[in-house]
Amino acid sequence: MPTSTRAVGFYREQHELVCDGVPLSAIAAAEGTPVYVYSAATLRARYRTIDDAFNGYPHTLHYALKANSTLAVARLLRELGSAVDANTVWEIEVARKAGFQPAEIVFTGVGKSAAELECAVALGVKAINVESAGELGRIEAIAVRLGRTARVAVRVNPDIDAKSHPHISTGLKTTKFGVPVDQARELLASVRRRSSLKLVAVHVHVGSQITSLEPLRRAAALAARVSKELQDEHAGLEYIDLGGGLGVSYDGRDVPSLDDYVSALVEEVRPTGLRIVLEPGRAIAAPAGALVARVVDLKPRTAETDFAIIDAGMTELLRPALYSAFHRIEPVIVRPDEARQYEIVGPVCETSDVVGRDRTLPQLHVEDLVAIRDVGAYGSVMASNYNRRPLPAEVLVDGNAWRVIRRRQTVDDMIRLEI
């Protein structure tokens, strides 16, 4: 499928929205809707910007698979030199299929089962980020039984308000994540007395979609302070894991730049001399994706507004229903019609299935295509089969070609395990 590459990401050529020069209407015509479209050039540019921002300071980027774990996306990040952050044993399996080695995998997650811990210890992953004293004890018992030394980091809960949506804010002591600072110090000290465990890092992660550097800087400062205490006791740490969490601009408002983000973290950690591990997901993937959908019906809402019902909803993109998240929505082809206000809703049998509230757009018509922007992260990975809706196709635009990287699911795919 030949194309021409003229720029990076999503932009307009005359009246039509394109991805790296490929008309979104052409992809929709070939693959149907709804369809996720990703820009490989944007993924590469975002990764390299973060990587370059360290300006020589020792670091490793572990792409957070939870943001988008489609195999082709994971492989693209590996080719760039990324390591990986996995939240489940199943993400570990996907990472290995994408070509990542166990030593390149950090295993996070607040509720790791015994089977998951056994897998991680047996594989010899780079680190298991420990969430509690009980979990550390279970890891130790598995390591003893297998005759292995398990590499661990302790996740410290710094009681810092990330000032993001409460559903994705993880740094307060009232959340389920990590070990409170005072308890963490005791736990960290105990690891050194346990011969089947090797303490490699202090870990901190205070949330997602954070749009201020202040909580990220404070978390990094605390991690650096705890790490320095351990260094003074000759603990032999290898790195500091600062998680991820930097937000992106979904609505056009200013957010910290990738350069400023990295600079703030390096400034706090530099006195320790320790390598930084960073786990970006959304910051890399979100701007690289759009969900293309088709208008299937229009009907009056008020005297001044209409419902625009599209063929994508909370089953394809859960964030608006779950978080009241905002995503830009725009026609793929803009007509010179007068603007009108729309409630853009999905087809799912739930009143919460609203994709965009009170949006002013050029007048829409049935069969028009719309693009929902910045969905490369926490889009396809959170999709479901509710109402027996099949998972959408996914397409990657790369260089002078685009290709399907996940075909559209069928009903036979859905029921195969039920027969």
Image (tube, rainbow, N blue to C red):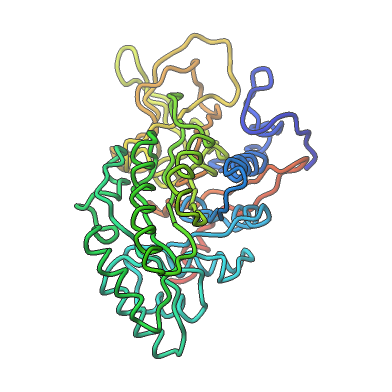
Front-lying residue, 80 or 167? 80
Residue 231 lies, in percent from the top left, at: 40, 63
Residue 291 lies, in percent from the top left, at: 53, 38
Res 227 → quadrant: bottom left
On screen, 10 above or below 209? Answer: above
On screen, 66 above or below 415? Answer: above
Res 137 → quadrant: bottom left
- Position of the C terminus, as image quadrant, is bottom left
- Position of the N terminus, as image quadrant, is top right
Q: How many labels does the image show?
A: 0
Horizontal side, residue 96 vs residue 300: left or right? right
Whether residue 73 can be seen here: yes
Whether residue 32 can be seen here: no
**Which residue is farthest left?**
174
Q: Which residue is drawn at 60% across and 39% down?
A: 49
Front-lying residue, 164 or 239? 239
Q: Residue at x 36, y 47 (%)?
A: 221
Q: Which residue is drawn at 63% across and 33% down?
A: 9
Q: Residue at x 40, y 69 (%)?
A: 235
Residue 246 lies, in percent from the top left, at: 44, 41
Residue 44 lies, in percent from the top left, at: 65, 44
Front-lying residue, 56 or 109? 56
On screen, 394 above or below 4? Answer: below
